[in-house]
Image: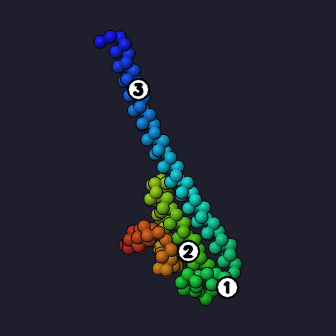
Amino acid sequence: MTIQDWFQTISLLGVALALLLNTRQIREMGSQTRSMLRSLEQNAYQQQLRTHSDHRILFFKDDPRLLSWHLGTRGYTLARSHQRNKRTLYALVKLDEHEANYLSYTGALLPEEVWLAWLEVIRADFGVKEFQDVWHNAKRFYVTSFVKYVDTSILARPE
């Protein structure tokens, strides 16, 4: 084997090693891109949720007739007092928040420690009669996985 053959062999090994490293970098970049995309999707969803909740609060909290109309068109049992209807509105806003945190957790965007703390908030909220009453009608407006989680892990859980 001549010195040229040795240089070609070493060059070939160098090129092969460079290709392997390049492949690894491309995979890592793809993984980072997917994470960033999931994060952007989650941010878009959270912004949509904030806007939705902000509008509901702005329009309905100080207008008893408009709040009653809104709740009635969504199938909720109307209370005789504006204060009780506002409790229903509060429960709906909190349910939106619970769903968003659930989706963040299941999408690996919320650390387990944060989720476990928030799970206690969900359990406490569903321990309140108004939340249970609202949930019966509200669950049709939420993603199936969240509904199933609440129904099987929160409400079916013995105290």
Taking 19 as reference, is 57 left or right?
A: right
Few, some or many C-alpha atoms within 10 Å of disc 1 (few <14, some 14-19, many ≥20)? few
Residue farthest to the top? Answer: 2
Q: Nearer the viewer, residue 40 or 5?
A: 5
* Along the viewing direction, whichever of 47 and 19 lies nearer the viewer: 19
Q: Position of residue 87 (x, y in %)?
A: 59, 78
> Residue shown at 60%/61% (left/top)?
47
Query: x%, y% of residue 122?
Result: 48, 67
Quadrant containing the C terminus in the rendered view: bottom left
- Is 70 located above or below residue 112 in the figure? below
Which one is in front in this view, the residue at disc 3 or the one at disc 2?
3
Which quarter shows the N terminus?
top left
Hey, which residue is sitting farthest bottom in the picture?
80
Element marked by disc 3: helix
Q: CA distance from mark 1 to mark 3?
A: 74 Å
Q: Quadrant of residue 61?
A: bottom right
User: How far apart are the alpha carbons under marks 1 and 2?
Assistant: 19 Å
Specify which label sits upstream in the sequence, 3 or 2.
3
Task: Give the residue pinned by disc 1.
Answer: 65
- Amino acid carrying mark 3 in the image: Val
Q: Report which residue position mark 3 lands on.
A: 15
